[in-house]
């Protein structure tokens, strides 16, 4: 039988695509399989229970403090991110479009996106945290707000680069039409640019939010790692990603299963948020 | 078609000035916020250089990390902490290398598959799954590699497990960049090949890949720059090691793992800056090289 | 040239004096153009692509201000007032512009598109004022009957020709002194083009129309005066009838006889 190169090539490409399917479905199965003991023990109450008690014989684990911590830090991050990322995108795509300044700012945004999480964590710990203390927000400088702040700095470049791309796509014809009617730049931005790029800009913040949900190292170093529901934004807490990073090394049995269950919940949360973002982008 | 008198002239005149002022204020706010946005990159790099340059010397690259006592003695006698981060450098390079030789071929193949079958339903599913994989938090990838590799293959923390987590992280990045790059190759070039009767696999090897080469390399470099700084998944998989290790079944260190270790050890804390500086250097160099390639290609 | 055209000072809506525009330092797209544009006439600017005809048009309402790299020299007077002393807001209210491709605002309804100038300029209109302006402007461009039942729908379902007429209505809503049109029919089919041409002839009763066109038969059909530009230079300017029959410059002759395009 003659060896058919054509067919082999196609088979090889198809086989490679199967790797993706296998990894993704294997990932879901492994996470589900690993979290069975936790869900068997605590049922769905696992999600709404606030107790995290590893004492032997009295073990009880609940994910709520971490879900709350994750959402709170990410929401704070996005609130800080919105004005900054929005302004920076306007700077690059509108105010200084096509100039040297815009490309320098763009490069710096890309560099920010490249900084490893752990370096952000160090900088947050040694620079940001003392500022928080000096400002008198809380005495240790750790907490939900500090973690949210560092998350904001981390996701801003991500939101900025998506928003910038979307804004650059708004047709110049439309903007010129508005200018020719006597609008100022601010009026063009609010009446033409934003209405036409609205859903894309919105999506950039959704995707940035999804990114913030799963960040680990920098958050771990700044959130204070208290396994309770925070009472305020300057209180300490913990996120889903950082409890896994913190406690995985010494975990086995029910505790390990609970951490995996938290990993599964985190996987689902980020999947839903990212899916929503991609869905909106596809409709553009 | 009589031309009616415009009644709003005077209002306009009055408002013109305030509108220009509003415009100026708005621009001022946008510029200020943009400068705030980019300020951390300057602050972080300056901080790393200011605090880290003292530790950068030859032994920093040629010796393994000191233990906590050596570091304590050096601090007490006012010396620079001895040793270096060779075990971290070699570990990072080793695991990135292992991840790359898995991710690059598979990523390229899947990227080509998506490009060739872009409109088909199955390809779209693969594309969506790739997007989902790209959004999975790296810590979760660490969990997965722990299950699959640490528990079942190497029976313990290992370089293999670390690089497998990095591989899953790298894969979607390479797939998407391959697909995007190939999309930019003009169809006519491909059709010219087919018209000459060139077989399918040769079109891929001789036409598509060479034409998109700079884009493919850029995608690979950027994905390496993304994984080289990863810490969380390695904590669950490679664990760390005090010596240089090139055995894929043994625990291995990495620069970010060492930084984490130094950060948690009061005696070694001075080493975090120089290590971070080196890590940042790797990341930024990879970024700048790929930018350079892109701008050259665009010319 | 001014004498030949016999334009009196009071007849000249626009007076362009020694206008030069450079897209980057030293690279001129328009060099030293002087011309007066006569009130209530259609004036066409013709020339091969890249000759600078759109550049002149965009210099008149200071569109080049948007791009920091572009440098403009010389003066433009609108009704005897130097436009450099006018704010862009006031200037552009008095000079409407219509673009090559129809560009109604896709996020606004048809009626909002007509009064977009007012909206963008932050002028609050009372309901009856708004209705009056919308109706009047759409009637002026003969679009009223076609869209009066769908004023609150987005304009994107309209045909290209209807969209372009909507854009003209948008420019008319401010009752400008001059309307600049930059190859307004180049994206349209012949039927839609004919409608726009008839419209422009009708509009000159109340407005001064300055039209850039790539299409010399269009210039011959509807313009009273014509400018011929070549390589950034104003080669010839005169009554269309005379220029098309008996061009004075060799380059104009060659262009009109199709030796280059």
Image: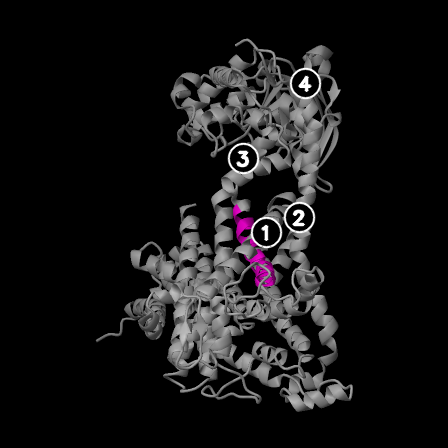
Q: CA distance from mark 3 to mark 4?
A: 28 Å
The magenta region covers A144-166
Q: Is tag 3's residue or tag 1's residue first in the polypeptide sequence?
A: 1
Residue pushed farthest left?
A1
Q: CA distance from mark 1 to mark 4?
A: 39 Å
Q: Nearer the viewer, residue C203 or C45?
A: C203
Comparing marks 2 and 1, which lies closer to the viewer?
1
Q: Nearer the viewer, residue B176 or A284?
A: A284
To the question of a shared chain for discs 3 and 4, the answer is: no
To the question of a shared chain for discs 2 and 1, the answer is: yes
Determine which residue is flagged by label 4.
B10
Label 4 Cα crowd, 10 Å radius (few <14 / some 14-19 / many 20+)? few
x, y percent for residue A6: 30, 67
What's the mark number on residue C137?
Answer: none
Q: Quadrant of the C terminus of chain C?
A: top right
Comparing marks 4 and 2, which lies closer to the viewer?
4
x, y percent for residue A9: 33, 69
x, y percent for residue B299: 59, 55
Residue pushed farthest right?
B78
SS for tag 3?
helix
Callout 1: residue from which chain?
A: A
Determine which residue is flagged by label 2.
A99
Q: CA distance from mark 3 to mark 1?
A: 23 Å
Query: Relative to B217, is B8 on the left or the right?
Result: right
Residue pictured at 62% horizontal, 77% vertical: B263
């Amino acid at each position: 039988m003659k060896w058919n190169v054509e067919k082999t090539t196609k088979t090889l490409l198809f086989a490679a695509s199967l790797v993706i399917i296998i990894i993704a479905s294997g990932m879901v199965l492994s996470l589900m399989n690993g979290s069975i003991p936790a869900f068997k023990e605590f049922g769905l109450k696992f999600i709404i229970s606030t107790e995290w008690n590893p004492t032997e014989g009295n073990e009880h684990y609940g994910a709520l403090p971490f879900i709350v911590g994750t959402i709170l830090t990410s929401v704070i991050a996005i609130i800080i991110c919105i004005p900054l990322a929005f302004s920076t995108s306007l700077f690059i795509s509108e105010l200084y479009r096509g100039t040297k300044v815009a490309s320098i700012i763009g490069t710096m945004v890309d560099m920010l996106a490249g900084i490893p999480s752990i370096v952000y964590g160090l900088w947050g710990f040694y620079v940001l945290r003392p500022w928080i203390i000096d400002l008198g927000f809380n005495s240790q400088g750790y907490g939900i707000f500090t973690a949210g702040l560092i998350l904001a700095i981390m996701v801003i470049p991500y939101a900025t680069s998506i928003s910038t791309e979307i804004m650059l796509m708004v047709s110049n014809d439309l903007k010129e039409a508005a200018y020719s009617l006597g609008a100022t730049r601010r009026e063009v931005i609010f009446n033409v640019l934003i209405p036409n790029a609205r859903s894309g800009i919105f999506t950039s913040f959704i995707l940035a939010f999804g990114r913030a949900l799963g960040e680990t190292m920098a958050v771990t170093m700044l959130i204070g790692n208290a396994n309770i529901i925070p009472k305020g934004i300057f209180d300490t807490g913990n996120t889903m990603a950082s409890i896994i990073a913190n406690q995985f090394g010494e975990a086995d049995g029910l505790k390990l299963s609970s951490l995996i269950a938290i990993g599964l919940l985190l996987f689902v949360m980020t999947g839903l948020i990212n899916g929503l973002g991609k869905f909106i982008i596809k409709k553009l | 078609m009589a031309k009616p008198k415009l009644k709003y002239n005077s209002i306009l005149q009055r408002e013109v000035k305030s509108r220009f002022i509003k415009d100026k204020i708005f621009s001022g706010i946008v510029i200020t916020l943009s400068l705030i946005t980019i300020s951390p990159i300057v602050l972080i790099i300056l901080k790393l250089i200011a605090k880290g340059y003292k530790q950068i010397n030859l032994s920093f690259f040629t010796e393994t990390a000191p233990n906590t006592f050596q570091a304590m003695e050096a601090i007490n006698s006012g010396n620079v902490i001895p040793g270096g981060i060779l075990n971290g450098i070699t570990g990072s390079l080793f695991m990135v290398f292992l991840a790359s030789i898995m991710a690059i071929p598979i990523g390229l193949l899947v990227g080509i598959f998506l490009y060739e079958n872009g409109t088909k339903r199955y390809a779209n599913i693969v594309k969506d799954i790739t997007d989902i994989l790209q959004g999975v938090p790296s810590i979760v990838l660490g969990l997965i590699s722990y299950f699959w590799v640490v528990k079942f293959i190497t029976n313990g923390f290992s370089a293999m497990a670390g690089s497998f987590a990095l591989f899953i992280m790298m894969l979607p990045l390479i797939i998407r960049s391959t697909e995007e790059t190939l999309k930019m190759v003009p169809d006519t070039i491909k059709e010219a090949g087919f018209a000459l009767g060139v077989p399918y696999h040769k079109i891929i090897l001789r036409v598509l890949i060479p034409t998109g080469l700079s884009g493919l390399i850029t995608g690979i470099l950027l994905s390496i720059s993304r994984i080289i700084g990863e810490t969380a998944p390695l904590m669950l998989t490679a664990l760390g090691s005090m010596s240089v290790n090139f055995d894929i079944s043994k625990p291995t260190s990495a620069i970010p793992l060492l930084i984490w270790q130094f950060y948690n050890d009061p005696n070694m804390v001075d080493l975090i800056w120089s290590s971070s500086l080196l890590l940042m250097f790797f990341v930024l160099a990879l970024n700048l090289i790929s930018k350079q390639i892109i701008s050259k290609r665009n010319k | 040239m001014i004498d030949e055209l016999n334009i009196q000072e009071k007849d000249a809506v626009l007076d362009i004096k020694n206008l030069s525009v450079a897209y980057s330092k030293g690279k001129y797209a328009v060099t030293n153009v002087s011309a007066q544009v006569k009130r209530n006439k259609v004036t066409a600017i013709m020339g091969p692509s890249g000759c600078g005809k759109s550049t002149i048009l965009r210099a008149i309402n200071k569109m080049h201000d948007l791009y920091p790299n572009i440098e403009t020299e010389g003066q433009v007077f609108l009704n005897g007032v130097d436009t450099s002393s006018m704010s862009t807001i006031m200037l552009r209210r008095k000079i409407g512009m219509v673009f090559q491709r129809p560009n109604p605002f896709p996020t606004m309804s048809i009626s909002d598109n007509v009064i977009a100038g007012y909206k963008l300029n932050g002028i609050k209109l009372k309901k009856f004022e708004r209705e009056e302006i919308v109706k009047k402007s759409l009637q002026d461009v003969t679009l009223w009957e076609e869209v009066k039942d769908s004023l609150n729908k987005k304009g994107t379902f309209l045909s290209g020709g209807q969209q372009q007429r909507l854009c003209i209505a948008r420019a008319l809503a401010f009752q400008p002194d001059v309307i600049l049109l930059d190859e307004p029919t180049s994206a349209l089919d012949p039927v839609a083009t004919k409608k726009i041409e008839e419209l422009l002839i009708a509009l000159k009763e109340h407005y001064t129309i300055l039209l850039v066109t790539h299409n010399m038969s269009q210039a011959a059909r509807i313009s009273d005066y014509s400018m011929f530009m070549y390589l950034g230079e104003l080669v010839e300017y005169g009554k269309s009838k005379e220029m098309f029959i008996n061009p004075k410059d060799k380059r104009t002759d060659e262009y009109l006889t199709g030796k280059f395009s």
